[in-house]
Structures are given as structure tokens and as C-alpha cells.
Image (cartoon, rainbow, N blue to C red):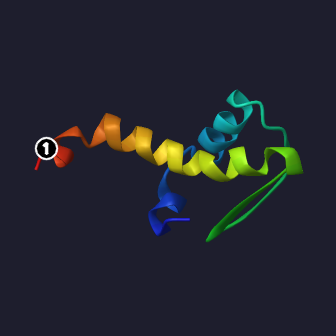
């Protein structure tokens, strides 16, 4: 997890919501300052693994449009 994420409200909620929207059942969540762990069913591993990258790409498109032009 990025060091600044611990100061960002909603990190667990946003990520959990994205998993739910994609039909991924969360079996368990564990968290501490530097790590967030989601346990999902084996059949959902690949989809869950790719989810943070998709969120990052969406974030870049929405909030960093000017950065991409340079």
C-alpha cells in the first residue's frame, strides 16, 4: 500500500465496494498500517488481483488529465 493511503479516507470502503461491484465475495479482511489484505475465493483471484490496477488507471484518467498532456 502506498504510504499516503493511510491518510486517505475511504481506502478500504472504495476497494471493498469495487470488489463487490465486480461480483467478488470478500471472505475476510485484515489490515494494519502498511498492509491491507482481502481474502477472496480462488475462482475470483485473478479478477481481484487486477482490480487495483484498474482503479489506478481510472484515477489517472479522471484526476490527472493535464499531467498526461505534457
Q: Quadrant of the N terminus?
A: bottom right
Q: Residue at x 70, y 31 (%)?
A: 22
- Relative to 61, is 31 on the left or the right? right
Camera-nearest residue between 28 and 51: 51
Q: Position of residue 43 (x, y in %)?
A: 86, 45
Q: Residue at x 51, y 43 (%)?
A: 55
- Relative to 41, is 54 on the left or the right? left
Residue at disc 1, secondary structure: helix
The relative height of residue 28 versus residue 1 in the rendered view (above or below) is: above
Camera-nearest residue between 38 and 51: 51
The relative height of residue 35 versus residue 28 in the rendered view (above or below) is: below
- Relative to 41, is 15 on the left or the right? left
Q: Residue at x 52, y 43 (%)?
A: 54
Q: Which residue is mark 1?
A: 69
Camera-nearest residue between 58 and 37: 58
Residue 44 in view of the camera: yes
Q: Position of residue 39 (x, y in %)?
A: 83, 54
Amino acid at each position: 500500500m502506498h504510504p499516503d493511503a493511510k491518510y486517505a479516507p475511504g481506502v478500504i470502503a472504495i476497494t471493498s465496494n469495487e470488489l463487490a461491484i465486480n461480483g467478488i465475495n470478500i471472505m475476510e479482511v485484515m489490515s494494519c498500517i502498511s498492509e491491507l489484505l482481502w481474502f477472496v475465493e480462488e475462482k475470483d483471484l485473478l479478477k481481484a488481483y487486477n482490480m487495483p490496477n484498474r482503479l489506478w488507471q481510472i484515477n489517472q484518467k479522471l484526476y490527472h488529465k493535464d499531467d498526461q498532456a505534457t
